[in-house]
Amino acid sequence: MSEKNCIIVTGATRGLGYNFCKFISKLNWDIILIDISKNAFKVYNENKKLSDLKKNLQNNNRLKFFYGDLSKEKNVKKIFSDIKKSKMVPTGLVNFAGGDIKGDDKLAKGGKAKNNNLFINTKDYKNIYERNYYSTLFTCREFIKISKKKKLGKIVNVSSISGTYGSVNEFAYSSAKSNIIYLTRSFANYAKDFNINVNCIAPCGTTSARFLKTIKKRGKKDLLRLGKKNLNGFASPEDISKVVYFLLSDLSNFVSGQVIRIDGGETTSPF
């Protein structure tokens, strides 16, 4: 992208979203941060005050914050209307909002569903699925609407390796992430006429603040992997940020409709 980069990041004040914001702030990119509430940044103890978070991201760039539950279309429309009024012109969108949590509170800190498998109860399934899938669908729609005229823009959606195969556990989350892959390919097919690239990443477990906060609730396999290094260990937040940067940068101008696994070779079968 030739003009000054201005990236919308959802789930931006914590976890992978926050780590990515730190990564691009070093490049002086302007950032539009969206999260579910003004206090969401406190959930995993990454920052004590919002002023600390801002200080960590300011580097001769502009920051703008917006808040709302992105699984509700009216909220997404309102936020994008407010972005337009702010005079910031986004060139990219990264959809980190979501996660395998019930998130049935204003901080979306939730916990794992009780039966987090094929037999998950309907309410928990709906909550997890909508938080992941609808937030991605609605933000993609609104970003493409405002980027059509410029014929410029890049979208990076976030799936998961669990969305690339049949998963018994984390069924609601995996279902949503699988559909995000289909959504990405469909939007890429539509948006190519407007010179908008739409791609997707599918990470494995990543040592984000949320992941480490919930590590005791994970299985023995994850606990063993946590102590391993390099390709046998988990991804780091920076591993994820580097690939997302590639997909937003000029390096990927002829890449669209693709899904990149970031899993150290954990899964090598086609999908």
Image (spheres, rainbow, N blue to C red):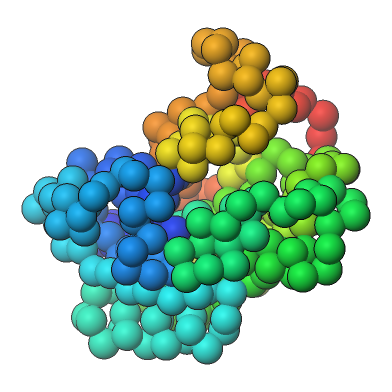
Say if 203 sits above or below 91 in the image. above
Q: Report whether 13 appears left or right of 86.
A: right
Q: Residue at x 20, y 55 (%)?
A: 49
Q: Position of residue 204 (x, y in %)?
A: 63, 33
Q: Position of residue 188 (x, y in %)?
A: 63, 62
Say if 258 sits above or below 61 in the image. above
Q: Report whether 70 appears left or right of 58.
A: right
Note whether residue 93 is visible.
no
Along the line of sight, which residue is nearer the eye, 111 or 57?
A: 111
Q: Position of residue 85 (x, y in %)?
A: 26, 87
Say if 180 sits above or below 215 in the image. below
Q: Position of residue 180 (x, y in %)?
A: 69, 59
Note whether residue 235 is visible.
yes
Q: Find the residue positioned furthest to the left.
A: 60
Question: Considering the image in quadrants, where does the C terminus appear?
Answer: top right
Q: Residue at x 74, y 41 (%)?
A: 162
Along the line of sight, which residue is nearer the eye, 247 or 106?
A: 106
Q: Residue at x 40, y 52 (%)?
A: 43
Q: Residue at x 66, y 44 (%)?
A: 160
Q: Quadrant of residue 209?
A: top left
Q: Report whether 155 appears left or right of 121.
A: left
Q: Quadrant of residue 101?
A: bottom right
